């Protein structure tokens, strides 16, 4: 799961795309060449790593191409987490007010999971402050909060990828001062295919339904 | 009559072509500061760095060109996570916006993901909310016309006008920066639309939702009287990235080198 994600098929794909798009360019010659060429380059580079192996469902977060770094400093893609139920939350480590409670909620959920499904679940904390939350800092945070077991994953990426991921989770956030953010307090449950299964909103709310949903989805894997 | 028919397509093509060459033009926006209605901590001005912004919103014709080049974004191939079911639903088919829609009308029913993708494919990006609001506070003559009554009335009267999204781009006033259609045509996506917090999220708009947010007390509308702008923020606050609606389009921006 935490292996490096060198993907040899990406370059092949880019070539394929180029061939395809060059054909199209011929058809639309009359539309500013330069612009198209410029735009092609930028887009091909960023083009989605479409599914080559198994088809990913339309509603899966594994459609997201973004690259992330975990608390061990390893580069991963979201889809490297595929196959397990994911419990995800967006936080930042310097947060003083809501995040400690959100983190406590996550720990509480983890503790209450039935033992026979624990191996099928990853608990993922995504930083909304990637500038401050370096892998080193995330690792320290994990240890400090007793969340350094194999089931815990901490992720950070670029600001743009983080904004996009928040959009998928319907989490809103805004930097209101250095080291201070406003953000929605939402814990999201994704099934093994990366589809959103449940969202818990608010702080210190009753997690019974969340746990039930996680258990349900995790048992499908067994 | 027959001649007319024959020449009409050519004519339309010429008009479209000339418009197209104009449409991709960007206006140069100078650096400046302003106090946005929303999002400034303790009414401190936010700084907007110099950038470029599309003069017009993206049109149906332009979006069609994009889809032809990147057909994975077409209606039938769009993935549910990136756009809801009404994505481009007003179009006739995947690669045809149909006769009911003007080629020069702004493309609407597009999600944040597809708008973002479009801009990336032009080597651009979506404007940030601060950038968008900064440009939008200008009238014909002034950089900041927000205190002008007639300017606010103009915006508010647009809110009451139905179906302006069917109009061609470039028909509203040209503002100080040379940008059209910031008001009077369609609402527009911004890069960080999901940084809006009103009293709780709009989807669950209750006072009791205060503890949905960390530090929410420190961000508040700096001027609730500015109803016109408040409406925009409230609208953004109600959106999710995969939502598409009939009156919501977008335009692109770019950093200045």
Image (tube, coloured by chain):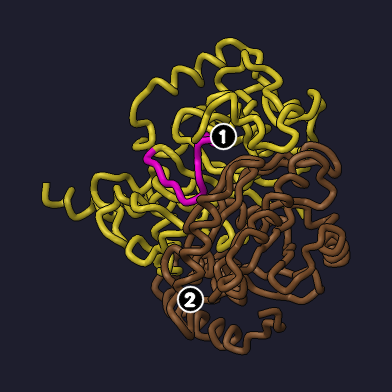
Residue B190 on the magenta span: no
Q: Is residue A121 left or right of residue A148?
A: left
Toward the left, the furthest residue is B2
Q: Residue at x 44, y 17 (%)?
A: B157
Q: Which residue is mark 1?
A: B201
**Viewer-side residue, B209 vs A110:** A110
Q: Residue at x 67, y 63 (%)?
A: A124
Q: What is the span of residues highlighted in magenta in the rendered image? A: B235-246
Q: Secondary structure at mark 1?
A: loop
Q: Residues within 10 Å of mark 2 (few under 14, many from 20)?
A: some
- Is the magenta region chiefly helix, strand or loop? loop
Q: Which label sits in the foreground, 1 or 2?
A: 2
Q: Is residue B172 above or below residue B78?
A: above
Q: Is residue B12 above or below residue B68?
A: above
Which shade of the palette goes to chain A? brown
Q: Is residue A154 left or right of residue B168?
A: right
Q: Which residue is mark 2?
A: A221
Chain letter for mark 1: B
Q: Residue at x 23, y 48 (%)?
A: B99
Query: Where, quadrant-wise, is the N terminus of chain A in this rendering?
Result: bottom right
Image position, residue A191 (x, y; %): 49, 66
């Amino acid at each position: 799961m935490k292996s490096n994600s060198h993907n040899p098929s990406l370059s092949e794909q880019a070539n394929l795309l180029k061939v395809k798009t060059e054909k199209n360019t011929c058809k639309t010659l009359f539309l500013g060449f330069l612009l198209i060429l410029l735009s092609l380059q930028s887009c091909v580079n960023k083009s989605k790593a479409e599914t080559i192996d198994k088809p990913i469902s339309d509603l899966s977060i594994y459609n997201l191409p973004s690259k992330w770094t975990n608390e061990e400093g390893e580069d991963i893609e979201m889809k490297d987490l595929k196959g397990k139920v994911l419990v995800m939350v967006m936080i930042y480590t310097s947060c003083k007010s809501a995040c400690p409670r959100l983190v406590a909620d996550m720990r509480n959920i983890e503790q209450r999971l039935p033992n026979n499904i624990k191996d099928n679940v990853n608990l993922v904390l995504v930083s909304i402050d990637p500038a401050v939350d370096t892998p080193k800092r995330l690792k320290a945070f994990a240890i400090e909060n007793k969340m350094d077991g194999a089931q815990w994953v901490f992720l950070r990426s670029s600001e743009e990828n983080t904004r996009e991921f928040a959009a998928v989770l319907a989490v809103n956030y805004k930097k209101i001062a250095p080291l201070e953010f406003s953000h929605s307090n939402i814990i999201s449950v994704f099934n093994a295919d990366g589809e959103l299964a449940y969202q818990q909103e608010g702080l210190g709310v009753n997690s019974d339904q969340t746990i039930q949903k996680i258990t349900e989805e995790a048992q499908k894997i067994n | 009559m027959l001649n007319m028919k024959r020449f009409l397509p050519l004519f339309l093509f010429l008009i479209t072509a000339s418009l197209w060459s104009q449409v991709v033009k960007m206006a140069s926006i100078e650096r400046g500061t302003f106090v946005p209605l929303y999002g400034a901590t303790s009414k401190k001005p936010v700084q907007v760095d110099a950038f470029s912004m599309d003069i017009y919103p993206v049109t149906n014709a332009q979006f069609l060109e994009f889809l032809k080049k990147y057909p994975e974004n077409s209606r039938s191939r769009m993935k549910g996570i990136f756009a809801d079911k009404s994505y481009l639903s007003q179009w006739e088919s995947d690669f045809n916006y149909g006769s009911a829609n003007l080629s020069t009308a702004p493309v609407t029913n597009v999600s944040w993901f597809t708008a973002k993708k479009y801009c990336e494919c032009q080597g651009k990006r979506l404007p940030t909310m601060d950038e968008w609001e900064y440009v939008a506070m200008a009238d014909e003559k002034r950089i900041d016309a927000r205190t002008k009554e007639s300017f606010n009335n103009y915006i508010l009267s647009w809110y009451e006008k139905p179906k302006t999204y069917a109009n061609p781009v470039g028909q509203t006033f040209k503002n100080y920066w040379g940008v059209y259609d910031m008001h009077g045509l369609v609402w527009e996506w911004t890069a960080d639309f999901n940084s809006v917090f009103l009293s709780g999220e709009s989807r669950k708009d209750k006072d009791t939702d205060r503890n949905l947010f960390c530090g929410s007390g420190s961000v508040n509308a700096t001027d609730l009287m500015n109803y016109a702008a408040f409406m925009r923020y409230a609208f953004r606050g109600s959106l999710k990235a995969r939502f598409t609606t009939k009156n919501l389009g977008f335009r692109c921006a770019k950093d200045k080198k």
